[in-house]
Every structure is written in structure tokens, then in C-alpha cells.
Amino acid sequence: MSTVLVTGATGFVGARLVPELLDRGHTVRAMTRHPDTYDGPGKAVFGDVHDPGSLAEAFEGVDVAVYLVHSLGDDDFERMDADAARGFGLAAAASGVQQIVYLGGLGSEDEALSAHLRSRREVEGLLGEAGVPVTVLRAAIVVGSGGVSWEMTRKLVKNLPAMVVPRWASTLTQPIAIADVVRYLAGVIGRPEARGRVFEVGGADRLSYAEMLAQAGSVMHGRRLPIIHVPLGTPFLSQYWIKLITGVDATTAANLIESMGNEVVVTDDSIRDLVPGEPLTYAEAVEAALVEDREAGAAG
């Protein structure tokens, strides 16, 4: 078993990954900028990826580091994420870390990637620049309670009597349940055969964004809501439409929606040789997210 440092331990993915790794017998350090208030499992350690000098103590004795942070809500996220990844990789190398695991984004390099996906791809290289082998899992939309993409979907379906969708809604994607993302991440951690490799991960279904909204509406309302395509352009939607209807931060929404012009599907399923098992369908992922939403509401 390995000693694993999980960055973003309180986030959407990290908060689910930490207990899974503990259940598998790993020793887990949960990195956070506020260890005094951390109440999750694992050992809380201080660290800030934007302050490389703070990382040495967090890395002490660590075999594997999981990188789950990004600055998508910032207007200058590309520079911030590049600087953070470079510093993190250097600190990991100095501490003798054997593997960095990173959750990146799908998207063909044969087409012009959005700024968001381009940044994710750049981070892959920068994390390993100092010599630590990096294992990359590239995913499309991750479906789960608390995830930004799911919140956008849920609120669109909830607040609109019919699905009014722009032209990017015909783009093909392969959404994946958060449970499958955690399973794949945990499955490559500490595996020598996964070092220095890029894996593509996705759910059971390839759907357009319009089909995703329709299926989510069917699960939530018991009927398929009407889909109306409108010729609205991405800039308008990014800044106003999504913000108006969902309340999601405009900068984050804009960066995510720009990526929706890129087809993001799995073209190489070699991850299944290393981490066997069938992923959930999109409908099953939506149902699981709704259960989590209800449980979170009851707990609150």
C-alpha cells in the first residue's frame, strides 16, 4: 500500500476519493489550505499549490500525489494553473514522489481545443516536467452531486418548461458518474504499470448535450421535456443565459461552455484492462446524483 497525498481533498472529487483510498488500505494525507477546520477522513496537512514553498512538509514520506485542483473560476486560470502545476511537479520530484495522478479532460488534439481543455492538456506536461511519472485520466463531464456540470444540468432541467438549447447542444460527449471516476483514480494509484500513461475514461453512453438534458429531464420529471434549438452563440450564452437560468458563476460557466464545442468521447478504452468493470449509464449517474442531492438536503 502507498502513502497518498490528495490535493483538493475537500472538493467534488477529492472528498469522495479520500475515503475510498482509506478503504483500500492506503495511508492518506488530505491537503488543504485550512487543516484546522478539516473534518474529513485521513490526516489533514497544510499545502497551497499556488505557494510551492508550502508543499515540502505535505510531501514528506509521500509515494503518490493526486492532483485535483484548478483555477477555472478565475479570468487568468491558464497562467495560474500552469504556474501551480510546474511548482507542484518540482516539489514532488524534490521529495521523491514516485507517481502523480491527474484528472484531465478529453478532447482530440487534431482539433482546436477550448482554453479550458488546452489548459488541462498543458498541465499534464507541466506536472511531469521535473521527472515524476504522471498518470493522466482524461474525462468529459463528471456527473455527481456538487459538481458544477451537474448543477448546471439540474438547474436547467428544473427551471425551464422546455429545453431551450443553443447550437453547441448537438456536440457529442461521454459523461461519467463520479463513482466511476473515483474507481478509476483509485485503481491506478500505486500501480507501476500505470506510470507515465494517459487513459481515457467515460461512462456507458455517448450522448449529445441535448440528449443529456432530455434524459435528465426524464429521470427528474418522469417525462422527456421538449427540446427547442435556438441559434444563440457561445459568448452570449456563456455570460448571460447560463448565469440567468442556473446561477452558476459566469466565468466558470463561460469556460465550461466554450469546451462544449469540442467533441469529448473515449477513443481508447485500455483503462479497462487495468481497472476492469462496467461504468454506469448516464441515467444511472443522474439517479445517483439525485439521491446524493436529497441526502445532502436532509443532512442540511
Image (cartoon, helix red, strand yellow):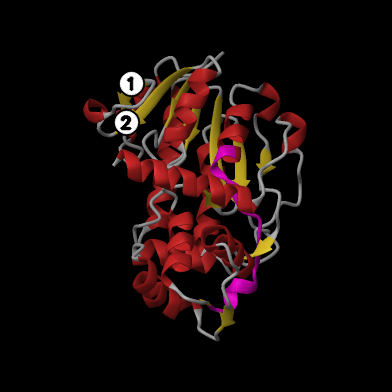
Compared with 211, 24 (above or below) is above
Where residue 128 sits in the image (x, y, percent)? 55, 36
Give SS at disc 1.
helix
Q: Residue at x 62, y 48 (%)?
A: 284
Q: Which region is colored magenta?
A: 164-179
- Please tell me which of labels 1 and 2 falls first in the chain: 2
| Mark 2: amino acid | Gly
**Figure check: 105 above or below 218:** above
For badge 1, the amino acid type reads: Glu
Question: In this view of the protein, which residue sits in the foreground, 53 or 289?
Answer: 289
Residue 144's tag is none
Give the quarter of the figure containing the C terminus. top left
| Mark 1 vs 2: CB contact within 8 A | yes
- Using residue 272 as the reference point, say whether residue 99 is left or right of it: left
Of all residues shown, which one is farthest toward the front? 222
The residue at which mark 1 appears reads as: 57
Camera-side residue: 269 or 151? 151
Residue 47's tag is: 2
Compared across the picture, whether 192 is left or right of 3 comes to right
